Amino acid sequence: MPRFTSLLFSTSTLSWFRGRRASAVLGWLLLLSYLPLLSNCSYYHSRPKEVQPERLSKLADKKLFLVHQGNSIWQLNNPRLNGEQLEGEKSEVTPQAQPYLNPPRRNVSPRYKGRDEQVVLNIVHLYISDFQPGQASQVHIPLSTIQRLEVLEEDDLSTVLSYIGIPAGVVALLFIIIALTKSSCPFVYAHNGTGYQFVGETYGGAIFAPSERDDYMPLPSLQPTSEGEYLLKISNELRERQYTNLAELCVVEHPDSVRVLLDRRGQPHTLARSLAPVQATAGSGPALVPALAAVDKRVVMFDEPTPGARPNSVLLTFANPGRARQGKLVLRAQNSLWLDYLYGEFTKQFGSYYNDWAATQQHESPQKLQQWALDQGIPLTVSVRTRHGWQVVDHIPPVGPLAYRDLVVPLPLADVAPGPVQVKLETGFMFWEVDYAALDLSPNLPVRLTRCAPHAARDEHGRDQRPALLHDDHTYLRQLQAGTEVRLTYRPAGLPAAAPARRTTAFLHTKGYYEPIRQYQGLPDVTELYSFQRPGRFIEFSKEKYRQSYQQMAVAAK
């Protein structure tokens, strides 16, 4: 067996990279099919929304409602909210709306011509279980029968790319990446009172057993059932084996006037006065404050040109009028889809020896895997400028590319010079996306944290998996193929009754790891594989692949 199987590559943090082997011919056919559309098309997708009376009332004033009931689809004209009912006239779908009867699937954004925009962005998809007929064509839809509400919106991806100035051809490339190479870590769904809603991916980057880690995921959409139970689901939907060690619900009771986030070690932090940066720059690029001051999907992608293996960075400056000695950096971030493509290109180079190499990683030390990841700029590194220079505060592990994660990082400020606070975010070329950044200088208020073991845990066959998820031990929930899932029921005990000016915020604490399943063919590229022992090589690899992709598209367009 070639010696490269003993090389240290930190796949512990390459979770979001996982690629699928795909036909190069198919890839180029897809690419060529996108090229004629780059100049005159927009991309759209549907967003699930909470069913709230206020939202329904606003949408009814200006949107076209398509109602899905079982296998039938009809149009609701002149919708209006009347107490706990949505009323209107039932009619056939107009010809203008016929092409949009079904919203796009999650993570698949269809193309529409610019002239269709007024229709596309004016559609609401309403999923109901029943309605009450009135006189003539009048119908009454009780809010309790509305199962889901989706609004068609312009896709984040095209908005992001146009904002940061990435060439239009990369839009096509990234959609091909999604189609051909997408893979991900365990998916988490939370029950919002009417159905399960996708929340995000858990223990991202914990690839292979030595990299097993804890994850604390916010659950903003989680709502109790009428019986007071909280329902969650963890599923394996891709080509990987998943091993979950622990799954507990953390419920924080806190003053209603503050937000609460758990840091990556599970410690709660209250947020009362989050300040936007007064300055935000990336190298010599434009000011980034408008992109980071609000949660609006205008993101920073760490794509500024940097030489060689040098990572990309964003410098944030915050006011500190009270000279606080402790602060909390608040971020909304996710990993980029570009990394899925990179990992696919990286793992292809092992050829038929991929599984041999993967077996060696099961015996590497966690410290070595973590150090490789740091050397390659894969985590999002947070530093603060002190009197003695830059001090690294934390390395944020991967959170996956399918959903943004709200993050908090405690910042020690006692050694910071008087005046503004400077914070640096650093990672490899296009490895992360940051949508929001703020500094909260308010003191942490007292909170009550309750940890709840699952009351029930049933897999897709109805088998009891609760013993595997109760404790941090050597017993795992083993989800070894796509299509497996576990449904979790929590009954938080000891929570105080609802009190004035108090509320609760929930988080899912999991611990585990997973293993991608790959079946590559051919001989390994040993020389290239050895190059990844060098610090910063993955950053160089990202830039090389980016340039190659752009050049290939330019040639194909001629």
Image (spheres, rainbow, N blue to C red):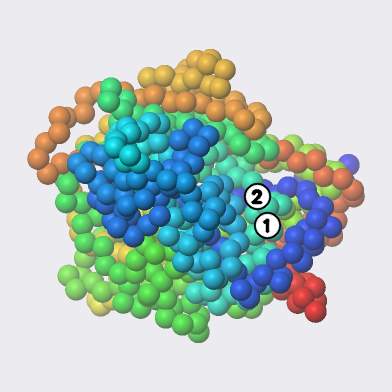
Q: Position of residue 42 (x, y in %)?
A: 56, 67
Residue at which label 2 appears: 182
Say whether disc 1 or disc 2 marks the residue closer to the N-terminus: 1
Q: Which residue is drawn at 49% across and 41% down?
A: 73
Report the amino acid beneath label 1.
Ile
Secondary structure category for the residue under label 2: loop
User: Where the C terminus falls, by quadrant?
Assistant: bottom right
Q: In which quarter of the image is residue 167?
A: bottom right
Q: In this view, does 537 lie to the left or right of 458?
A: right
Crowding at dot 2, Cα within 10 Å, few <14 / some 14-19 / many 20+, comes out as: many
Q: Which residue is drawn at 54% across and 47% down?
A: 102
Q: Position of residue 238 (x, y in %)?
A: 64, 39
For residue 311, say whether it is visible. Answer: no
Residue at which label 1 appears: 177
Q: In this view, does 420 lie to the left or right of 404?
A: left
User: Where the N terminus falls, by quadrant?
Assistant: top right
Report the amino acid beneath label 2.
Lys
Quick check: marks 1 and 2 in contact, CB under 8 Å?
yes
Q: Residue furthest bottom?
A: 284
Q: Quadrant of residue 363?
A: top right
Q: Position of residue 463 (x, y in %)?
A: 53, 15
